[in-house]
Amino acid sequence: MASYNKIIMMGNLTRDPQLKYLPNQTPLVEFGLASNRKFKLASGEDREEVCFVDCTAFGKQAEVINQYFTKGKPIFIDGRLKYDSWEDKQGGGKRSKLSIVIDRFEFVGGRDGAGGGGGGAPANYEGGDDQSQGRPPARPPMNRPPQQGNRPAPPQRPAPSAPPPEQPFGDEPEFKEDDIPF
């Protein structure tokens, strides 16, 4: 039986990213993410629930997240769920948790990190899983990461009049009905 493990989430960092290095010097960053869901009960009462999850990124993505994100900043992530289990050394017993290994992320909001649409296209950063070993992103970012400090922002370029046609499945060969064996 085939399986599929994919998760897409958007939320705010619950703590500053923590950058570490694996023994082979591959960068690794860990941070917490909170995603809110607002809904109404049948009675009309407004409710909100929050999902907290730990996230991990590797390679160049880890370095970029560590450099440009802090607690409270919004981020859009695309990745896979990972199940970890261990023995609790203090209280005994088995512990476990689900976390997200990031394959790709995007900056969300304006240059000041506030939520909302922000101008222009979001910056995309792609990478593989922990096997990527610090390789550069599969494609360059669409725009630069947000400016830090008191430097003036570069002038905004006008948005293109029409987006380029999108390739639905990337570099896959063209499919023809005659190729079907039945």
Image (cartoon, rainbow, N blue to C red):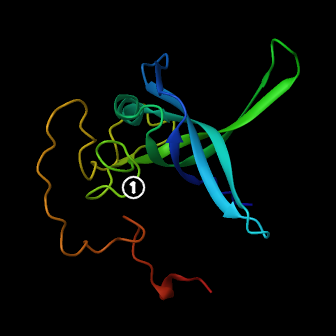
Corner quadrant of residue 134: top left
Residue 60, percent from left and from top: 36, 33
Q: Is residue 86 above or below residue 82?
A: above
Residue 179, percent from left and from top: 50, 82
Question: What's the residue type where badge 1 is placed?
Answer: Gly
Task: Please identify the quadrant where the C terminus is shown.
Answer: bottom right
* Tally of numbered discs: 1
Q: Nearer the viewer, residue 112 or 103?
A: 112
- Residue located beneath label 1 in the image: 116
Q: Is residue 148 above or below residue 9?
A: above
Q: Nearer the viewer, residue 21 or 49?
A: 49
Q: Nearer the viewer, residue 114 or 64?
A: 114
The local secondary structure at tag 1 comes to loop
Name which residue lies at 43% across and 39% down: 73
**Along the horizontal axis of the image, is 175 left or right of 50?**
left
**Along the horizontal axis of the image, is 3 left or right of 43?**
left
Name which residue lies at 28% across and 45% down: 111
Residue 146, percent from left and from top: 27, 41
